[in-house]
Image: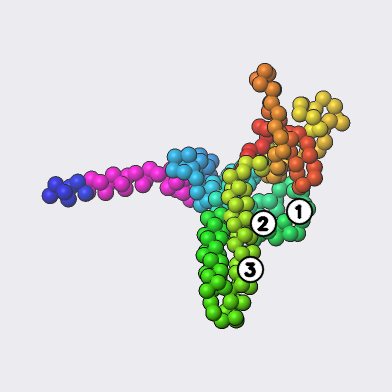
Amino acid sequence: MKSILASLILLIGASAAAQTSPAIAADSLYNNEEFRGATEMYARSIAEEGPSAETYYNLGNAYYRTGQAGRAVVAYERALKLNPTHEDARTNLAFVNSRIEDRPEDDSAFLSNLQRSISDSMTANAWAWTALTLFALLLGAAALYIFASGIGTRKCGFFGGILLCVLFVYSLATAIGSASRARSHSEAVVIVPTTYLSSTPRPSSTSTEKLVAIHEGTKVEIIDSLSTPDDPTSPKWYNVKINNSTKAWLKAIDVEKI
């Protein structure tokens, strides 16, 4: 009887814990169209329960529903960092990007875009396992070439080994690149309605120093940063690059790193 009672108490406790889970609470708020509360609970879930692609995806949806397109882009991008194969996050990111004002055209090289597409077809871990499998097959091909007695079999081992070696090196390099990109924080997204690119890392005093206005949701690549620790009132600045060409400075508080 005591064991049954203890089991019931544990079951009730587990049920209560599940009901108070930030992720579950966030889902409930989202379904009730309380989107601002949902963003807070999804952010709490990430802080307390750890990040996941699905939670970032849900957070992006909630941010978009509250009109925060920039933060929605950040959340979708973070989801794709954790899981490049998350098609819903990729679809929603493309939708939000299509609605961003003055979004720059992508002028990346064709081969660079192709490699990025191939890399995003699997996670970094999946690429690593693929490389490991190819290495094992490479060892088998080498053994076939060394120990087989037939000429035809040895040729298969030799040429198959060359092909497997190329694929192994490519898969390993892709796994390393994918993992490095997932850990990188060199990209950021504008989270304010409008910010200005400046030719100098200080508030523009003349119209010639203010280059161009960019709007919420625009993604930038951070090249360098500058701050003045002796002056706490002075904002931190990022030297950024947009679309592989435009380089300028903007206030760090106007963007959020991915």
Q: CA distance from mark 2 to mark 1?
A: 11 Å
Does dot 1 land on a helix, a strand or a loop?
Answer: loop
User: Over which residues does the magenta segment extend?
Assistant: 8-31
The structure residue drawn at horizontal position 55% and vertical position 72%, both measured from the top left corner, is: 146
Does dot 3 land on a helix, a strand or a loop?
Answer: helix
Q: Which is more toward the observer, 81 or 175? A: 175
- Which residue lies most toward the left here? 1
Q: Which residue is mark 2?
A: 116
Please tell me how crowded label 3 is: few (under 14), some (14-19), or many (20+) other residues with Cα within 10 Å: some
Say left or right for 133 vs 186: left
Residue 64 visible in the picture = no
Q: Position of residue 249 (x, y in %)?
A: 76, 34
Q: Which residue is mark 3?
A: 162
Residue 115 visible in the picture = yes
Q: Which residue is mark 1?
A: 108
Q: Tell me whether circle 2 and circle 1 mark residues in contact (CB < 8 Å).
A: yes
Magenta stretch contains residue 104? no
Does dot 2 land on a helix, a strand or a loop?
Answer: helix
